[in-house]
Amino acid sequence: MLRHPELDSESVAVKMLNQVQHDLINEMNQTTTDITAKTNWAKIRADFPVLEQQMNGKPLVYLDNGASSQMPKSVSDRMDAYHKHEHANVHRGIHSLSQHATDAYESARTKVKELINAGSLEEIIYTTGTTDSINLVAQSYGRSNFKAGDEILVSEMEHHANIVPWQMIAEETGAALKVIPMNDKGELLMDEFHALLSDKTKMVAVVHVSNALGTINPVKEIIETAHQRDIPVLIDGAQAVPHSKVDVQALGADFYTFSAHKMCGPTGFGILYGKKKLLEAMPPYRGGGDMIDKVTFEKTTWNDLPHKFEAGTPPIAAGVGFSTAIDYLNEIGIEAIAEREHELLEYAAEKLNQIEKLTIVGTADKKASVISFLLDGIHPTDAGTILDQHGIAVRTGHHCAQPIMQHFDIPGTLRASISFYNNEEDIERLVEGIELVKKFFG
Ligand code: PMP
């Protein structure tokens, strides 16, 4: 476990007290979740109390997992127990409660490291989410490395979180944003990508899985190609880590970002993975408590990684909850999750393809569990409103990816994003709902 330098972790008395308290709290936190049969999807669905409720008089069908996934009871119970019995500030207290809170909070770092196969704990930076992670890289790495005439390469299918932070730092440094185009299936044009790379390129920032189209991008190829020119690559993995096995070392990514709230965890918490060598050379992004080594009015020196980038009191309960969320996902198995979601995606695609006057937007050969679609002559917002009246939650609009909508010359889409706790019945309810929408609009 990574200990904060301010803590005296060697004290035997402290260790014994910690152990006793840890055992007691573990006992208290026995949750009702008991995933014994790993592929018993009905049982797994029952771990999500939110799915048991009625919405507008109908059983809720939640198909907006791309925006935020739901939380199993084990995670909310864990956060509740933390608030009730374990809360104290982290990294700074000699007292046992603070040390226990620190351990619980830091446990997420070890689990994230293992989940994505990072090289060390120093490479796992806690942030408030993908958006914050990308801003950190843009403001820290970008500010100290970009200059006038440099180019930052993003793709046409980025979420705004992987466009705007680069635009902001480009404006400040005089660098320019360049865009890898995509075809009408929603696949990146790799020839264009190769052609856009030059000595001017100082960063490639690409989404692993598109939240609006579902496209799985060839990020390994992108990273290898950029590395031939020593260009660092940031991968926005917000929609990839929840749904597939990601190995940052096998990919070779320099930076990789994701959010806890899309992985059965809480909001306000996320991860920036960065290669240690790069992170070490980067200046802090925010100043304050916890990120310092020594402060005088003349000069301040920085704490070691990862704390150098983690100023101030963090969202401790969220970190604790995320730790449990990773346990939960691991218990089911990321591979089993990926398989189940693929099964549901194929089922949904088959059903939706049979509906007349429905067009699927984003038909890449390699897709994750997102289906964006349009209904002829019906505005997505109107269709979404009717679906909601029937208890069906889908996202409508531009999905924070306006350039994608500009590509297709559409105002937005309806998007059903599937999770492992959805089932075939949810898809059938969506199909019925779409028929009702069509009937309503004649
Ligand atoms: N990138 C992608 C691909 C996303 O889907 C999202 C969330 N919709 C984000 C970035 C931003 O994530 P967050 O709002 O958690 O920072």
Image (cartoon, rainbow, N blue to C red):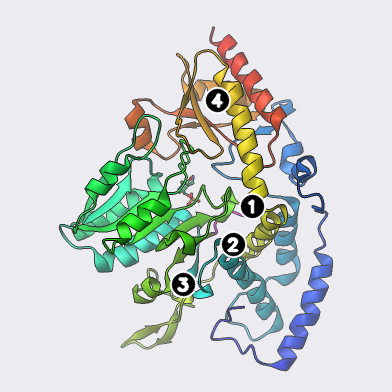
Q: Residue at x 55, y 25 (%)?
A: 384
Disc 1, disc 2: CB below 8 Å?
Answer: yes
Q: Which mark is residue 384?
A: 4
Query: What's the magenta region?
Result: 264-269
Q: Which mark is residue 311?
A: 3
Dot 1: few (<14), some (14–19), or many (≥20) neighbours within 10 Å?
some
Q: Which mark is residue 334?
A: 1
Q: Is residue 419 visible?
A: no
* Marked residue nearer the N-terminal end (1 or 3): 3
Which of the pair 439/182 is nearer the observer?
A: 182
Is disc 1 placed on a helix, strand or loop?
helix
Alpha carbon distance from label 4 to label 2 = 35 Å
Tell whether 431 sits left or right of 30: left
Dot 3: few (<14), some (14–19), or many (≥20) neighbours within 10 Å?
some
Question: Mainly helix, strand or loop, the magenta region?
Answer: loop
* Marked residue nearer the N-terminal end (1 or 2): 2
Alpha carbon distance from label 4 to label 1 = 30 Å
Q: Which mark is residue 115?
A: 2
* Marked residue nearer the N-terminal end (3 or 2): 2
Which of the pair 234/265 is nearer the observer?
A: 234
Point out the frontmost of discs 4 and 1: 1
Q: Is residue 316 above or below residue 359?
A: below
Give the amino acid type for the residue marked by disc 3 in the picture: Ala
Residue 152 placement (x, y as % from top left):
26, 54
Give the amino acid type for the residue marked by disc 1 in the picture: Ile
Tell whether 103 sits left or right of 405: right
